[in-house]
């Protein structure tokens, strides 16, 4: 349905995207993961015809869009990372404006606006000025603007950034419903759990290149020989993390809020040693759980950095 073939993008002397190959089949939900600066947004801009590649092609229904992007644009919905709305207009007026851009008019436009407002849960605020909306409401309206013309493919670039948990849950429920209804989806996020919830297959990108692709199960098999120990306790400091790294040279140690996550090969039997090191360093461990490999573990294994880095 949508295919990227050897996409490359250079800005002056800087290579942003290198030899990216991707494919989205009709009805698939595809995740695109990568740390900041990996080239995700540039790749999405090329796939949606907003940016021309330096070399390579984007194929839509067997035809190149490099010279003729209109066939894709008519049936594509894009939810950008930044809010793209007119703050002085009402929710209804914003949707009507974007609907006209897609060629909708008359009673059909009115029907689609009302239908979309219902879908994104803003019917009761349709006449309110957008600048009075919360961040979550603006995000929902941003999504609505991309759904008006009933696109056959939807590209969403971090659609839940900077919003409250309730709005985020509402947006995820809406997107999950779209996927279940057969929408073809390309989704990027800084939240690994969102991609796990919504996506059938996942591309992982780093330094402008695709470094892995597969289903969640296939990607997790890349670290099936590893184990992750989740440590909770008192006085878990970065200094103790360095102690663990010194003791277990093959391990990766990361600190998330009040939790230490220690990943290492399964052949290691570390718990007794970890508790002994804790006692030596005046650290009290209140729980130690050995977890099965997660998508986060795969990401760290492949890129060496957390998704939010």
Image: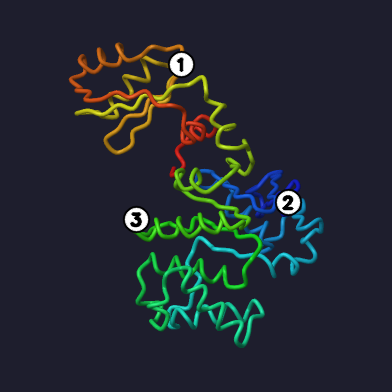
Looking at the picture, does residue 39 appear above or below residue 262?
below
Tag shown at residue 3: 2
Q: Residues within 10 Å of mark 1 (few under 14, many from 20)?
A: few
Corner quadrant of residue 107: bottom right
Q: Residues within 10 Å of mark 3 (few under 14, many from 20)?
A: few
Q: Considering depth in this image, is 242 or 25 the residue closer to the camera?
A: 25
Q: Considering depth in this image, is 98 or 307 the residue closer to the camera?
A: 98
Tag shown at residue 165: 3
Q: Considering depth in this image, is 46 or 225 the residue closer to the camera?
A: 225
The image's colouring method is rainbow
Q: Name the residue under label 1.
A: 266
Q: How crowded is mark 2: few (under 14 residues within 10 Å), some or many (20 or more)?
A: some
Q: Do the residues labelled 3 and 2 touch (CB within 8 Å)?
A: no
Who comes first in sequence, dot 3 or dot 2? 2
Looking at the picture, does residue 128 appear above or below residue 277?
below
Question: Tag 2's secondary structure?
Answer: strand
Question: Tag 1's secondary structure?
Answer: loop
Q: Are marks 2 and 1 in contact (CB under 8 Å)?
A: no
Tag shown at residue 99: none
Q: Considering depth in this image, is 105 or 229 the residue closer to the camera?
A: 105
Q: Position of residue 181 (x, y in %)?
A: 58, 58
């Amino acid at each position: 349905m949508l295919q990227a073939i050897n996409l490359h993008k250079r800005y002056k002397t800087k290579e942003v995207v290198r030899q990216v190959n991707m494919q989205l089949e009709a009805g698939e939900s595809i995740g695109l993961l990568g740390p900041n600066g990996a080239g995700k947004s540039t790749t999405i801009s090329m796939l949606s015809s907003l940016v021309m590649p330096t070399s390579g092609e984007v194929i839509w229904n067997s035809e190149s869009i490099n010279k003729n992007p209109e066939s894709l644009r008519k049936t594509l919905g894009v939810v950008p990372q930044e809010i793209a709305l007119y703050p002085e207009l009402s929710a209804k007026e914003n949707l009507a404006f974007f609907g006209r851009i897609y060629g909708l008019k008359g009673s059909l436009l009115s029907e689609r606006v009302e239908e979309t407002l219902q879908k994104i849960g803003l019917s009761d605020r349709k006449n309110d000025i957008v600048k009075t909306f919360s961040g979550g409401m603006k995000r929902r309206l941003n999504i609505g603007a991309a759904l008006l013309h009933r696109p056959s493919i939807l590209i969403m670039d971090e659609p839940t950034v900077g919003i409250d948990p309730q709005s985020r849950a509402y947006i995820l429920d809406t997107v999950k419903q779209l996927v279940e209804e057969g929408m073809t989806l390309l989704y990027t996020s800084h939240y690994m759990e969102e991609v796990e919830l919504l996506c059938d297959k996942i591309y992982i990108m780093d330094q402008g290149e695709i470094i892995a692709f597969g289903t969640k199960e296939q990607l997790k098999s890349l670290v099936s020989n590893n184990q992750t120990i989740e440590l909770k306790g008192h006085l878990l400091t970065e200094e103790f993390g360095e102690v663990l790294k010194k003791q277990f040279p093959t391990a990766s140690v990361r600190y998330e809020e009040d939790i230490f996550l220690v990943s290492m090969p399964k052949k290691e039997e570390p718990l007794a040693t970890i508790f002994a090191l804790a006692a030596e360093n005046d650290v009290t461990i209140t729980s130690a759980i050995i977890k099965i490999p997660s998508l986060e573990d795969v990401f760290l294994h492949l890129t060496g950095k957390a998704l939010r880095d």
